[in-house]
Amino acid sequence: MALASGVRFAPRALLRPWALLRGTTLGRTEPAAGGGGDGARRFGSQRVLVEPDAASGVAVMKLRNPPVNALSLELLTELVISLEKLENDKTFRGIILTSDCPRVFCAGLDLTEICGRNPAHCAEYWKAMQELWLRMYLSSLVLVAAINGACPAGGCIIALSCDCRVLADNPKYRIGLNETLLGIIAPFWLKDTYVNTIGHRASEQALQLGSLFPPAEALQVGLVDQVVPEDQVQSTALSEMARWLAVPDHARQLTKNMMRKATADRLLRQRDADTQNFVSFVCRDSIQKSLQAYLEKLRQRKG
Ligand SMILES: CC/C=C\C/C=C\C/C=C\C=C\CC(=O)SCCNC(=O)CCNC(=O)[C@H](O)C(C)(C)COP(=O)(O)OP(=O)(O)OC[C@H]1O[C@@H](n2cnc3c(N)ncnc32)[C@H](O)[C@@H]1OP(=O)(O)O
């Protein structure tokens, strides 16, 4: 991921992402509804829809992994590939990340990827999660999250990896890291991302309590930058994007790197150990039982 200055951001580490695309349609390009020229062509994959606007240099990337955009291995992989594709295309300077699923931005880790799975699968899954975070956190593009739904746990981390967050004003759209309520522990790099955004004391409290903040509180604590009526999320995200794109790319990119590199490097230095920790933790019988019980609760809640 070379910057204009030649500085490199995230190393290409995962990576066999193409191999992970089981039966997806990534790379297909089709005209957007009502669209005409190049700027209106959209591309993407089964789970990530990309609507590029070449004229503005901004692409809207929509998560569409119904019902709740849980971060399955396929979704993680498709996100990395779509991000890479836009980063390698000099036309684009910014991405607005949003959800195509009603009422949910992203439900976080797909718990079915770590419940009742073998250690090798859990390791592969966790590496994909690390990879997406590294790519997003250090992206040379401006990333604006247009949060149009609930945003717990891994969903919150996706949003926090962006440069700016706009949240729809709906009390059901809560955001935060609720891991402790599932009986699991946010790894250090999720914690670091939280601390970098809302500070140490607020993180200490919110992480231990597993707080999910409704919009007004999320704004107050600094988890999001704007809370706006639901029908203004996209337009506000575009206005925010314009503000960020008004800054010369090289200066903004180098500043972003300066602010975020140490946090990313910490994971890069201990990526394997972090994977091993994750696998040995989630594969414990007691953790499997609590994850299973949590999933069961979610499923029953429905009826
Ligand atoms: C020593 C330490 C070392 C290492 C660290 C160890 C561990 C670290 C780990 C982890 C980090 C984890 C981060 C995470 O992301 S954990 C996931 C947390 N996510 C949640 O808690 C969200 C759960 N979901 C919800 O709260 C709701 O679904 C909702 C608010 C997002 C949406 O509500 P709805 O009412 O619209 O939808 P539902 O009816 O609840 O759900 C529909 C459907 O989807 C299933 N589902 C929901 N969330 C998940 C999920 N995260 N994974 C898989 N499946 C999910 C739900 O069961 C329903 O399924 P059915 O249709 O009933 O089959």
Image: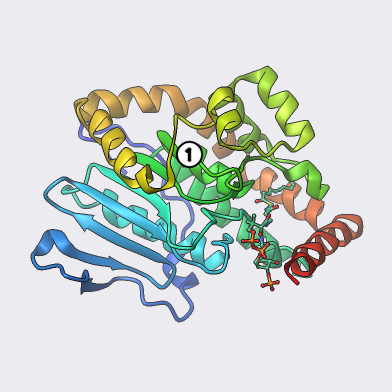
Q: Residue at x 35, y 72 (%)?
A: 26
Please identify the quadrant where the N terminus is shown: top left
Classify the position of ligand 1 by quadrant: top left, top right, bottom left or bottom right: bottom right
Q: Is residue 60 left or right of residue 246?
A: right
Q: Element under label 1?
A: loop
Corner quadrant of residue 296: bottom right
Local packing at callout 1 (Cα closer than 10 Å; few below 14, some 14-19, many 20+) is: many
Q: How is the image coloured?
A: rainbow
Q: In front: 187, or 217? A: 217
Q: Is residue 100 left or right of residue 208?
A: left
Amino acid on which the number 1 mark rests in the picture: Ser
Q: Is residue 250 above or below residue 153?
A: above
Q: In front: 235, or 193? A: 235
Name the spot of residue 204 as percent of width and height, x first.
73, 24
Q: Is residue 2 above or below residue 284?
A: above
Q: Residue at x 15, y 45 (%)?
A: 56
Say if residue 16 shows up in the picture: no
Name the spot of residue 167 as percent of width and height, x first.
47, 40
Name the spot of residue 14 as percent of width and height, x first.
49, 55
Q: Is residue 211 above or below residue 148?
A: above
Q: In front: 250, or 219? A: 219
Q: Residue at x 31, y 25 (%)?
A: 254
Name the spot of residue 239 as percent of width and height, x first.
27, 35
Please identify the quadrant where the C terminus is shown: bottom right
Q: Is residue 209 left or right of residue 150?
A: right
User: Which residue occupies the extreme right position in the image?
Assistant: 286
Q: How many marks?
A: 1
Q: Residue at x 22, y 30 (%)?
A: 249
Q: Which residue in the structure is indicated by mark 1?
A: 161
Say if residue 8 shows up in the picture: yes
User: Which residue occupies the extreme bottom position in the image?
Assistant: 23
